[in-house]
């Protein structure tokens, strides 16, 4: 009797092993988690960094505008015009043009 029960148990285990080996693994939860990690995790990280940058940019602009409104930005409202203002503008325009050509 013991030999018969043992052989039945062995047949059931081999049947389960054959079922598990032939099963379609494309729908397994582990595979779904791995696919999520390889495809969506980088996109999630980039999205979160973009949102954090947008929030930081908005807060920085708000602080700058508040400081400017209160007169604490360090700049004066009226600037003195120098004699070389036209020459400086031309030099800056030339430097900007050269940089644009180098970048392109």
Image: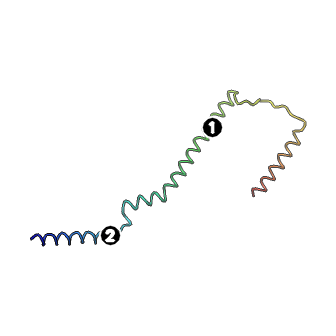
Q: Earlier in the sequence, mark 1 or mark 2?
A: 2
Residue that extends furthest to the left in the rendered view of this protein: 1
Task: Identify which residue, 6 or 43, lies in the foreground.
Answer: 6
- Identified at 27% across, 69% down, the residue is 17
**Disc 1 to disc 2, C-alpha distance:** 56 Å
- Identified at 48% across, 59% down, the residue is 38
Picture quarter with the C terminus: bottom right
* Quarter of the view holding residue 6: bottom left
Is disc 2 surrounded by few (<14), some (14 to 19) or many (20+) residues within 10 Å? few
Q: Which residue is mark 2?
A: 23
Side of 55 where 40 appears, left or right: left
* Quarter of the view holding residue 10: bottom left
Question: x, y percentage for residue 30?
Answer: 38, 60
Q: Which residue is mark 1?
A: 60
Side of 42 where 8 appears, left or right: left
> In this rendering, is residue 77 above or below 99?
above
Is disc 1 surrounded by few (<14), some (14 to 19) or many (20+) residues within 10 Å? few
Question: x, y percentage for residue 56?
Answer: 59, 40
User: Mark on residue 29?
Assistant: none
Question: x, y percentage for residue 102?
Answer: 78, 56
Residue that extends furthest to the front in the rendered view of this protein: 3
């Amino acid at each position: 009797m013991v030999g018969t029960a043992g052989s039945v148990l062995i047949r059931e285990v081999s049947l389960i092993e054959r079922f598990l080996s032939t099963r379609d693994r494309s729908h397994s939860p582990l595979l779904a988690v791995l696919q999520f990690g390889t495809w969506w995790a980088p996109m999630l990280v980039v999205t979160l960094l973009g949102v954090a940058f947008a929030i930081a940019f908005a807060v920085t602009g708000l602080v700058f505008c508040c400081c400017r409104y209160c007169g604490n930005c360090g700049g004066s409202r009226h600037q003195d015009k120098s004699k070389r203002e036209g020459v400086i503008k031309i030099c800056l325009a030339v430097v900007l043009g050269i940089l644009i050509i180098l970048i392109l």
